[in-house]
Image (spheres, helix red, strand yellow):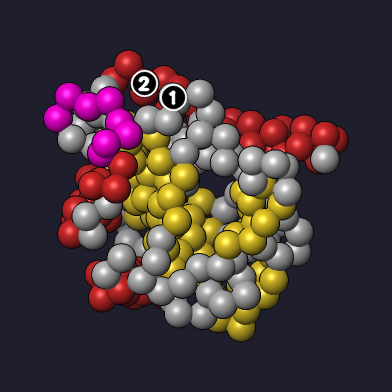
Amino acid sequence: MNPSIVREFADLARRKPSRHFSIVRPRWNSDIRWIGPRSPEGYRLFESAFRRLGIARHVEPMLELDHEPRMYSGFLVTRRRCGAPDFHVDWRDTGQQAFTLMTPVSGNESGFGLLYRDGSGTIREYDYEAGEAIFFTDDFLHSTKPGSSDEPVVLLCFTFGTDRMKYWDRIRATSGSQSALMCRPDGRFEKISRWQSWRRQLGWLAFRAGFRRSA
């Protein structure tokens, strides 16, 4: 990952977002915020970075495509504190046709990383590092690692994958909570209402509760 392109988003994380961006605050054990596009103009800011970073080439061999991978959304994740894990998955039943990528923006991410469950069921840690990204697809159970920071820790995130509409219902079912606007596999924009976002967050909370009962 080219750090200079990633750092272009540092100012967006610090200032009050304009009308082209939305802020979502999920009901998690942290002060996490998602700053994502509300308009096509906001979407294109993230899409420009997505293309310049060459992200699509990493997953293109894994996808079913008509033309090229599609970026569904880009957004920033900011947080100062996390009191307890909120384990969840971003994607379910997409046939590995949708991905999330995360990379640090702010430079103060040390010690405030990612918890995840590996194939054996063991909870492990991933530490974010400038110039490096992690991406994942279906059934990747993960959470912010509990911790705190004097200044917000900022991550740049993208959701992306196939350009075939036959997967859209499954992709939309488990995504779309992070911003008010998403781009569908066919390139058309779809607005995400507060009601839709709330329902998807409830789904994540229900999944988390189920995880805790089975842990």
Q: Please indicate whether residue 198 sits to the left or right of residue 45 in the image.
A: right
Label located before the other in sequence (1 or 2): 1
| Quarter-of-image position of residue 21 | bottom left
Cα–Cα gap, marks 1 and 2: 9 Å
Magenta part of the chain: 60-67
Q: Is residue 10 above or below residue 170?
A: below
**In the displayed image of the protein, which residue is found farthest to the top?**
166
- Return the x and y of residue 23 as percentages of the image width and height: 46, 55
Could you tell me which quadrant the C terminus lies in? Answer: top right
Magenta residue check for 62: yes
Label 1: which secondary element: loop
- Return the x and y of residue 120 as percentages of the image width and height: 70, 41
- Label drawn at residue 95: 1
| Quarter-of-image position of residue 46 | bottom left
Question: What residue is rendered at 43% in x and 46% in y?
Answer: 100
Question: What residue is rendered at 32% in x and 34% in y?
Answer: 62
Few, some or many residues within 10 Å of mark 1 (<14, 14–19, 20+): some
- Return the x and y of residue 55 as percentages of the image width and height: 27, 52
**In the displayed image of the protein, which residue is found farthest to the bottom?**
150
Amino acid at dot 1:
Gly
Which residue position holds label 2?
A: 167
Give the dominant element type of the magenta stretch: helix, strand or loop.
loop
Amino acid at dot 2:
Tyr
> CB of mark 1 within 8 Å of CB of mark 2?
yes
Could you tell me which quadrant the N terminus lies in? Answer: bottom left
Residue 180 can be seen in this image? no
Question: What residue is rendered at 77% in x and 32% in y?
Answer: 210
Residue 53 can be seen in this image? yes
Q: Is residue 204 above or below residue 33?
A: above
